[in-house]
Structures are given as C-alpha cells and as structure tokens.
Image (cartoon, rainbow, N blue to C red):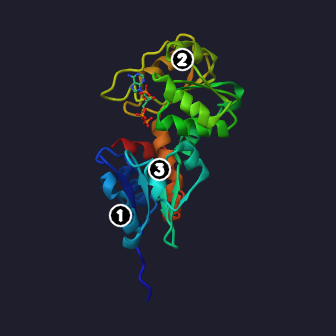
C-alpha cells in the first residue's frame, strides 16, 4: 500500500506573527475538506536558502514569501516567471517534483481580481490610473494595470527618484508626477490607488487633496487594517466607487492554494470574516 502524503505549505518571513495567510489558508483547507497544513515560519535572511532547500524534502509543496525575503528569493529560485522578474520580487514558491524551486508573483493578480470582483463596472481602459507610492507593492500594481490595458499611469511618490526608477523599468505609459502635485494627478484619473503605507494602523493618515477626484472614479487602497481608510471614506462621500485592500490579500492567495492543494478555493463574505478574526 502506498503511503498518502499530507501536503504542507506555509509562509516565510521575519517577523511573521502578524501574517494573515495562516488564517486564510487554514480556513480554505478546513472548508474544502483538504488534509493539509499551512504553517507560519520565522526565518532569518542568512538561513533562507538552507530552509528553502530543506522544506521540499520534508513534504512541503510550496511556500509564500513575505518581508524581508521577497527580493532575495529571486536569486535562490531555479525558475522565475517573467512577471516576478519584472516586478523584482516573488511572493509564491512552488516546489516541483524534479526538485526545482519555481518563483512567481501573484500580487498583481490579487490586485486586479479584487477590483474586478468588487467593482464589476470598472473599466481600466477608460482613462489614466493614478498610483501613489513607488515601493515593492507599487511595482506589482503598475505591472498589473499595464497588463489590463490602462492607457497611462500617473505615478507619484514622496521620494521622486524611486518613481523615476519605476518609470524606467516599466516604460512610456508611466508618467512621474511630483508629490507636491499629487492633487492635480488625482483629478485626471479614473482609477486611483494608494500603495503607500500611510493610513495603516500605527502610521499617519494619507493626507492628499481629494477634492478634485472624479465622481465615479474607482478608488482603492492596499491598506486593509483598518478596512476603511480616510482615502476610502472621503472618496465614497464624493461619489467614487471604493474597494478596500482585504480582497487583494485574499485573491493573491488563490492561485497558490490551487497549485499546492489542487483545489480552487472559494472567496466570499465568510472568507473575509475568517481573515479578520
Ligand atoms: P512596500 O514594499 O510595502 O510598498 P516600501 O518599499 O517601504 O513598502 O514603500 C512604502 C511606500 O510608502 C513608499 O512609496 C514610501 O515613500 P518613500 O519612497 O518616499 O519612502 C511611502 N511612504 C511611507 N511613509 C510616507 C510618508 N510619511 N509620506 C509619503 N509617503 C510615504
């Protein structure tokens, strides 16, 4: 009789205690009746490669990668998808049967899927998108917006040089706008995205002029704690369509769960509740 292996997956980062991924994957494993485990793992940078080479031998089928390892993991992986290379970071690893580590980035998929599911009338091709921030999260957002046919991305960051580097990597459809002119940039956009950490619990609010926002524009925030940021609250009051950031966290996990455990997980109100618990 052949022995049935229980598939293992998890998330690697440092610190890792705050990660919502174990709750999410644990919820899906339970509700879909899958015998598997998803484990948070605190790993220091100097141990990353050793850990990644050992986990497949212990029954792991893959892992999520989070801060501070999302960039470093590209040098360890044997295969890296084009989109992870373009973004310059990976969040999902597949441990293949042949021993190779395959790195991908599903953040952009999660970002777009959250908008498609929660704002079904959103048309990304209808006009420019305004993106605030130029960190790692912004790179995934910009790549995915270009993929779905946004005609132009207006990009503004407190530290202008970071936005300029991003513009060089992503090309002519990205235009850098000075942070002092962020209000003017928002007036032009049919899609508005906050990728900065401002508005998160423990950080200052994002204070940018919102009075020029177009009625009917789609406004979304990558921040999900709190769910309702000042940006989303004020945009909603002005008649914009708003989508919070929790769905991005959930949808970026869907392709990974499917690859690892062989079942496409459901996303509904119960999934959100499970993550928020
Ligand atoms: P992530 O990878 O999650 O995007 P990050 O690389 O640290 O994280 O980027 C955080 C983003 O929030 C950056 O765009 C940062 O702007 P800088 O590049 O100027 O640092 C932005 N940010 C953080 N604090 C800010 C503040 N007080 N005002 C404006 N932008 C801020």
Residue located at (50% from left, 16% from top): 237
- Give SS at disc 1: helix
Label pair 2/3, CB-CB below 8 angstroms: no
For ligand 1, tell me if the residue under mark 2 lies within 8 Å.
no
Residue located at (60% from left, 40% from top): 144
Mark before the other along the chain sequence, 3 or 1: 1
Crowding near the residue tagged with mark 1, few <14, some 14–19, many ≥20 C-alpha atoms within 10 Å: few
> Distance from label 2 to label 1 (Cα)?
43 Å
Residue 175: x %, y % from top left = 63, 24
Mark before the other along the chain sequence, 2 or 3: 3
| Quadrant housing residue 3 | bottom left
| Horizontal side of residue 195 vs 47, given as left or right | right
Disc count in the image?
Answer: 3
Residue 184: x %, y % from top left = 58, 12
Query: Which residue is identified by label 2?
Result: 178
Query: Which residue is identified by label 1?
Result: 50
* Disc nearest the viewer among 3 and 1: 1
Q: Is residue 220 visible?
A: no
Label pair 2/1, CB-CB below 8 angstroms: no
Mark before the other along the chain sequence, 2 or 1: 1
- In this rendering, the answer to whether 106 lies above or below 141 is below
Residue located at (37% from left, 33% from top): 225
């Amino acid at each position: 009789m052949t022995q049935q292996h229980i598939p293992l997956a998890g998330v690697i980062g440092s610190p890792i205690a705050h990660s919502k991924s174990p709750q999410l994957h644990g919820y899906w494993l339970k509700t879909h009746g899958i015998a598997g485990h998803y484990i948070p793992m605190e790993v220091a940078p100097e141990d990353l490669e050793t850990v990644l080479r050992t986990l497949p031998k212990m029954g792991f089928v893959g892992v999520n990668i989070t801060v501070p390892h999302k960039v470093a993991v590209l040098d360890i992986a044997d295969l890296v998808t084009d989109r992870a290379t373009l973004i310059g970071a990976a969040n999902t690893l597949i441990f293949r049967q042949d021993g190779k580590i395959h790195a991908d980035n599903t953040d952009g998929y999660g970002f777009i899927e959250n908008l498609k599911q929660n704002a079904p009338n959103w048309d990304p091709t209808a006009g420019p998108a305004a993106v605030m921030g130029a960190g790692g999260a912004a790179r995934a957002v910009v790549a995915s917006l270009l993929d779905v046919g946004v005609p132009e991305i207006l990009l503004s960051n407190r530290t202008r040089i970071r936005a300029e580097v991003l513009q060089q990597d992503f090309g002519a459809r990205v235009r850098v706008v000075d942070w002092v002119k962020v209000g003017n940039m928002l007036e032009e956009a049919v899609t508005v995205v906050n990728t900065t950490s401002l508005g998160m619990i423990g950080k200052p609010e994002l204070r940018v002029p919102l009075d020029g926002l177009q009625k009917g524009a789609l406004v979304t925030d990558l921040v999900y704690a709190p769910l309702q940021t000042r940006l989303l609250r004020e945009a909603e009051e002005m008649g914009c369509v708003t989508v919070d950031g929790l769905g991005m966290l959930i949808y970026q996990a869907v392709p990974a769960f499917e690859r690892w455990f062989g079942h496409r997980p459901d996303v509904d109100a119960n999934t959100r509740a499970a993550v928020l618990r």
